[in-house]
Image: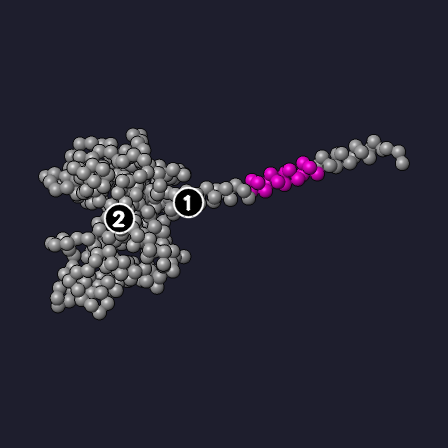
Amino acid sequence: MGFNFDTLFLFSLFSLALLVSIQQVNATKSHSVSGPLRGRKELNKCNLFYGSWMLDYDSYPTYDSLSCPFIDAQFDCKKFRRPDQKYLQFYWKPDSCTLPRFDGLDFLNKWRGKKIMFVGDSLSRNMWESLSCMIHASVPNATTSFSTRESMSTIIFQDYGVTIQLYRTPYLVDIIEEDVGRVLTLDSIKAGKAWIDSDMLIFNSWHWWTHKGDSQGWDYIRDGPKLVKNMDRLDAFFKGLTTWASWVDDNVDPTKTKLFFQGISPTHYQGEDWNQPKKTCSGEVEPLPGSKYPAPLPPANDVVNSVLKNMTKQVYLLDITLLSQLRKDAHPSVYGNEKNTGNDCSHWCLPGLPDTWNILLNAALIM
């Protein structure tokens, strides 16, 4: 049989067309499949809570305390003449990804008609006021209302139907009045009925568990059948938080309600924690560089992680402790009152660090 050049030419054209077709199919698969997979992989690698503090003089702060109607005086460091401004201009940069910018208008539209509730102590108040101010800065002419009744404080952005509430309960479990006085009852959460219909819940506790003397919020602790004058505070916290976890598991539907736990907020009263034993937060004007804090994480961190790990319902931990430990400069210190007295190294200036907590909350919701 002779060699047929026409047949060879046609076969070559067919092979070339088949090769191009295969490459086009592979290119289409690469665009439609591996792109999103790569995106998910990148997000899975992203640790929002490990990074360092960077300066941005142009974009921060995102609001002015004087223009926000929701800030408590004790957090308004600018009002009480804090002389330095640098603490307002640090932003958190995770090592493994970029945080999305917070857009208050976009947040309102996404949560239109919904109820968001912070449940906890004054650190919850810090974060609640921060979120409200960040949103208000985006829609300064929006109609809002503010009300307080007993344990509940409520801000409503009426044009959007978005309600942002604070329910003050420092221990999450109940303080019950008995004949002996105020009893911290480790297995009771009657207050939970006020939280049940929220679309997002952000819980927090620990700050008040350590208080003693006149600032202690209870007279006795009821630990099951036992009524005791005192007990190990970490043990009490674990038992109270376990009661809270059981309440969440029994009462909250995570397909309807987003669940968060605001991690342990550190204090800066002991300078030895950052290798400056003669100092407190007073006079500090910069965060620690990098991602390492000399002192260990507070032991309450282990309690929170242990309890969350054993829950049936998944609660997202806003793991703010380390990044907040680095911000020894961000407390009100003496700038929490008109006389510039005292030294508050527990709470945080607004604008300030709690704005980053809310940026991280927003990132957790949309990433």
Q: CA distance from mark 1 to mark 2?
A: 28 Å
Q: Which residue is mark 2?
A: 298
Residue 366 in view, yes or no: yes
Q: Nearer the viewer, mark 1 or mark 2?
A: 2
Query: Quarter of the image holding residue 251?
Result: bottom left
Principal SS element in the magenta part?
A: helix
Q: Amino acid at mark 1?
A: Met
Label 2: few (<14), some or many (≥20) within 10 Å?
some
Q: Is residue 178 magenta?
A: no
SS at mark 1 in the image: loop
Label 1: few (<14), some or many (≥20) within 10 Å?
few
Magenta residues (range): 18-32
Which of the pair 339/296 is nearer the observer?
296
Residue 66 in view, yes or no: no
Q: Which residue is mark 1?
A: 367
Query: Quarter of the image holding residue 183?
Result: bottom left
Which of the pair 296/79 is nearer the observer?
296
Q: Position of residue 329 (x, y in %)?
A: 22, 37
Q: Position of residue 146 (x, y in %)?
A: 23, 49
Q: Residue at x 26, y 43 (%)?
A: 295
